[in-house]
């Protein structure tokens, strides 16, 4: 991960499964066909790559994959940036390992994201980098008390974050852990983990494409979900992706 770029250059750490991973998004696979979910995950990852590679972002990019070294030639063919392996028994272990690996090699600000928040735009990433530059703890809150983005300024200690994932309210635990830092909150977005998240995403993309003002739309994901329709379960509030997969 050595770099000849100035040591103060910030890093965006992308923490993800490879784009063609056939077990990604396991909770979506409980209700939707495997082949569709694999395509959806692929779209999420490629849209995330497009977002982080936007020319207005002055930063390093480090991709941490749940993969093995044999996959690296394929991953490097997608994007010529730094690629590392995730290591650890749990999600929290692997994230901590990746953060520590970046901090050992690069001394600038770190912004970490996943690949399951397709509405994360280059402008939000630029906003996060700017707030980190001002020495702020940056949190992009998501559904259910989690976060889709975490920005840690270079002056701050890199705490062990693994305990934050056992609380159910990661954003509050992070705020308390870094209580000495000013907090910068990004717009609330949602990770797409279950079918109801995907239904919300479909509606949001449709609204953004219909708006008169230009709004960010993840192109690959939008193409994939554009033809999906939603049904209601009788008179209940329950909504489902229509049974076009049957």
Image (cartoon, grey):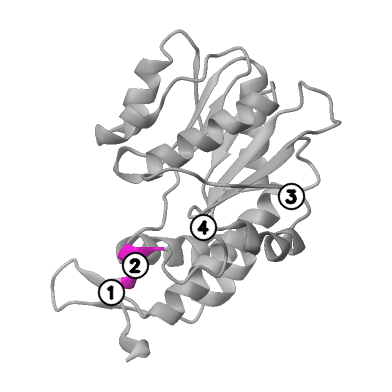
Tell me the SS state at disc 3: loop
CB under 8 Å between discs 2 and 4? no
Q: Which picture quadrant has residue 61?
A: top right
Which SS does the magenta portion mostly show?
helix
Residue 167: x %, y % from top left? 24, 32
Cα separation, mark 4 vs mark 1, equals: 20 Å
Q: Which residues are magenta?
A: 25-29
Q: Nearer the viewer, residue 157 or 36?
A: 157
Residue 15 appears left or right of 8 = left
Residue identifier under label 3: 53
Compare residues 148 and 30 and report the one nearer the observer: 30
Residue displayed at 49% across by 44% down: 87
Q: Name the residue beneath numbered marker 2.
A: 28
Query: In the picture, which quadrant includes the C terminus?
Result: bottom left
Quadrant of res 160? top left
Q: In the displayed structure, does residue 216 sit left or right of residue 188?
A: right
For the residues labelled 3 and 2, the Cα–Cα distance comes to: 27 Å
Q: Which of disc 3 and disc 4 is earlier in sequence?
A: 4
Which residue does the numbered mark 4 point to in the structure image? 17
């Amino acid at each position: 991960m050595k770099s000849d770029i100035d040591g103060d250059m910030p890093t965006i750490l992308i923490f993800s499964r490879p784009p063609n991973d056939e077990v990604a998004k396991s909770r979506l696979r409980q209700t939707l066909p495997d082949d569709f979910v694999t395509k959806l995950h692929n779209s999420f990852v490629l849209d995330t790559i497009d977002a982080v590679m936007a020319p207005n972002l002055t930063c390093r990019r480090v991709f941490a994959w749940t993969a093995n070294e044999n996959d690296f030639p394929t991953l490097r063919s997608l994007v010529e940036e730094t690629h590392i392996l995730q290591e650890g028994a749990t999600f929290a272990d692997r994230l901590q390992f990746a953060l520590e690996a970046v901090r050992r090699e690069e001394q600038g600000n770190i912004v970490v994201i996943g690949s399951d928040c397709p509405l994360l735009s280059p402008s939000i990433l630029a906003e996060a980098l700017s707030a980190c530059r001002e020495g702020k703890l940056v949190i992009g809150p998501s559904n259910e008390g989690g976060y889709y983005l975490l920005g840690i300024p270079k002056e701050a200690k890199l705490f062990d974050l693994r305990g934050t994932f056992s609380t159910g309210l990661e954003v509050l635990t992070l705020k308390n852990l870094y209580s000495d830092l000013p907090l910068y909150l990004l717009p609330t977005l949602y990770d797409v983990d279950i079918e109801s998240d995907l239904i919300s995403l479909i509606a949001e993309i449709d609204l953004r494409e219909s708006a008169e003002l230009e709004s960010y739309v993840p192109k690959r994901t939008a193409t994939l979900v554009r033809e999906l329709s939603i049904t209601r379960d009788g008179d209940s509030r329950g909504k489902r992706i229509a049974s076009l997969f049957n």
